[in-house]
Amino acid sequence: MSIQKIAKLAGVSVATVSRVLNNSDSVKSKNRERVLEAIRESNYQPNLLARQLRTSRSSMILVMVSNIANPFCADVVKGIEEEAEKNGYRILLCNSGSDIERSKSSLGLLSGKMVDGIITMDAFSKLPELTSMIGQTPWVQCAEYADTGDVSCVGISDTDASEFAIRHLIARGCRRIALINHDLSYKYARLREQGYKTVMQEQEHGYEAIEYASELSFSAGKAAMEKLLQAAEQPDGVFAVSDTLAAGAMRAIGDTGLKVPQDIAVIGFDGTELAEMVSPQLTTIQQPSRDIGRQAVSLLIKKIDNPESPAERLMMDWHFIVRASA
């Protein structure tokens, strides 16, 4: 279906259809509705290349995700896609795997004006290497909150959330609380470890045990927990920085004949569906994953529409979900 046929179907000029497609305010509401109805009836898809030539915009957003297999990342991307489509944008997804070369390859799209902006979920420590390539392109960092800088971002207070989780374990009687963390090149991993250490150092017994999972996976969480169980002094509580790691930890605990939470209480992080699928169900810090994605798109569109606007930082609320594991 061409733009000319849409105009004929709606009983308006080609110019009117073009103004509607470009969100012009000069179209009468009656004519706009007729055009939109014709578009709906014909399932018309505008030619993005032609629109780009007219408007110097592609209506595309590049989304760089560190690990799309991570349920939390997948939920954030769903929120990004929903909000982008609502505002007339499509997304190009790059699963970078935190690989700097793969990230640089995807950023080549910026030089060709193939995308209007970029949302990243990579580690902050790796981003300085990409900054020169991103240049002045509108950019939002998603799910890794920055206190300062020129990049807009949206996330939660990881430190506060982790402190709350550790205090919950202490309140239920745990004294030897271990942490299963991930790559410290991610700011969230550093902040969650900071929250863990802050509370543990307040305790008189001085127990502290941290294992670093090789990746955010079930098997890596299981391996990290197995190491903790080999210690002379086993933990009676475990805080894992993702639900996936926590699920692996619970399997390792069960394989030794111990029980959750009677012998070792477990808390996860993210609030994914996995937390309700494991047995016993997992106590977790729930992030507003889809809302984080939606807000990232809103911040990005503001920057696309007004490149000179200052960076914005949104701190979202988190919730503590108590279930049987702790």
Image (cartoon, rainbow, N blue to C red):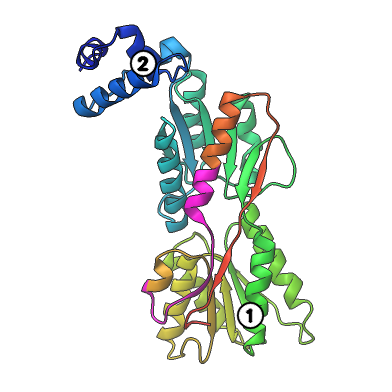
The percent coordinates of residue 48 (x first, y second) are 35, 19
Element type at mark 2: helix
Disc 1 residue type? His
Disc 2 residue type? Leu
Q: Is residue 85 left or right of residue 143?
A: left
Q: Report the residue at 29% width, 20% height from top.
A: 35
Q: Is residue 29 above or below residue 226?
A: above
The percent coordinates of residue 313 (x first, y second) are 67, 44
Q: How crowded is the residue under tag 2: few (<14 C-alpha within 10 Å), some, or many (20+)?
A: some
Q: Who is closer to the viewer here, 230 or 22?
A: 22
Q: Is residue 69 left or right of residue 171?
A: left
Residue of label 2:
49
Residue 255 visible in this rendered orientation of the protein = yes
The percent coordinates of residue 274 (x first, y second) are 40, 67
Is residue 281 magenta-colored? yes
Is residue 122 magenta-colored? no
